[in-house]
Amino acid sequence: MMDMTAKSPRRQRCAIYTRKSSEEGLEQEFNSLHAQREACEAYIASQKSEGWALVRDQYDDGGISGGTLERPGLKQLLADIEDGLVDVVVVYKIDRLSRSLMDFSKLVEVFDRNGVTFVSVTQSFNTTTSMGRLTLNILLSFAQFEREVTAERIRDKVKASRMKGMWMGGNVPLGYDVCDRKLVVNAEEAATVADIFRRFVEVGSATVLARELRSKRTLNKKGKLIDKGYLYRLLNNRVYRGEAVHKGAAYPGEHDAIIDARLWNQVHDIIGESPRTRANNSRTQTPALLKGLLFTATGAAMTPSSTKKGTRRYRYYVSMDLLKNRETPDDEIPRRLPADTVEGAVITEIRRVLRTPETTAQVIAKLNSDDSPEADAIAALQQFPELWAQLFPGEQARIIQLLVRRVTVTAEGLVIDLRTDGIAGVMREMMTPRQLEAAE
């Protein structure tokens, strides 16, 4: 007796994909694509009892190689699969879908993700059966093997090329251009790189140098302002030594070096120290703020000096008259002054002058002629104490040299002669890093 409760098979929407590598014969009324489609349609008809039904859309690629996935018909098929319009993909032979195992595995990933099965009508390959899925797993294993062998071959090629000193692509370093797949020195940029290395040896601080480069608007290869991170990468890039590097190992490169061994070693001796040690060295090696600016009323220069008691060091300015035991007409003129006291007095006077309305008007007038924002000029004048405190001693000494013409020590006190014409330039310099930081 027939079981009237048996359910009919679930409808399976079948899409036929056909492909022909050459364009030869496509103009014929009946060509290879038609033959493939007829065979697939006959196979789908034979599976009608399983609920298979052909979709109306056709997915054909004539004259396109199976070595690429950039095929209009295939792209449309994958789009319809992603939209849930296809349940089974039917092809005449496996290689009609793809000749590359790696590409084939990518297609199968799309099929699996959308619950789509795959059938080849002329081969024993049908992922709706257990044997078909086993065959698929074998094919995917070979695809994985092919990927790993290809990756290993590429890595070996890159390593061999690096060992020969060849440029293998990537971001082109500042100081070089690429010509015929080789690094060629860019003279203008190379001069900038060499200046950066030399300047780092002088200041011993990436923080100070990065601030200086930003104030000068020095740009990297991509046209962006150089920051501290980029600066460290530049200083550690062995390309500038004329070398090619692969996984930490350096080999003689085909390109010319920009930095010689002596300068490179000087830079890396400094980098090898801890940042705290470098900062302390920078402070102890910085010349006195008033060196070359401080004189007695008799015209004798006062030179920096220091003494050490225990772990503390005391700094002074000492008259050359005292050092050379020369007689002076006025014994009331101090011939030895604590450095902190006299430097503090000069800085206090600078702060006072910068707060006066006359100085503010002078600076604004000067900067307005250079199209600098008035608000920024006023802010720099008002915030001078905070900006000053953020500077390294070397920068402080340089700014003092720009602002002070002469300091004279008299019996009554200090006579400070400031360069008022230099105040606007200093303010512009101190404004620039803040403006750059605000713009980023």
Image (spheres, grey):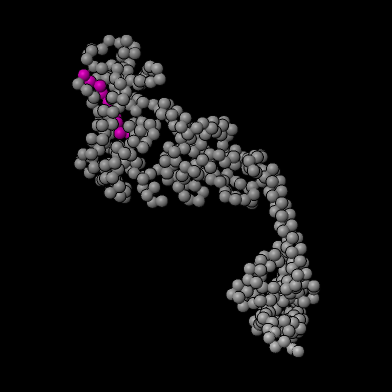
Which residues are drawn in magenta? 402-411
Vertical order, 146 against 292 (above or below): below
Left or right: 270 with respect to 105?
A: left
Left or right: 158 with respect to 358?
A: right
The residue nearer to you, when weighing 262 against 349, is: 349
Residue 237 horizontal/vertical position (percent): 57, 41
Left or right: 362 with respect to 58?
A: left
On whether residue 403 falls in the magenta region, the answer is: yes
On whether residue 234 falls in the magenta region, the answer is: no
Vertical order, 58 against 252 (above or below): below
Which residue reaches farthest front?
A: 1
Q: Looking at the magenta stretch, what is its main secondary structure?
A: strand
The residue nearer to you, when weighing 269 against 184, is: 269
Total numbered badges shown on the rendered structure: 0
Instruction: Tell me the residue at 30%/50% (across/down).
Output: 373
Instruction: Tell me the residue at 27%/20% (across/down).
Output: 296
Residue 253 horizontal/vertical position (percent): 65, 41
The residue nearer to you, when weighing 251 against 385, is: 385
Considering the image in quadrants, where does the N terminus appear?
bottom right
Camera sees residue 139:
no
Which residue reaches farthest bottom?
A: 1
Instruction: Tell me the residue at 42%/44% (across/down).
Output: 214
Residue 382 horizontal/vertical position (percent): 26, 42
Camera sees residue 279:
yes
Residue 259 horizontal/vertical position (percent): 56, 37
The residue nearer to you, when weighing 65 against 141, is: 141
Q: Which quadrant of the figure has residue 412?
A: top left
Instruction: Tell me the residue at 22%/20% (across/down).
Output: 410
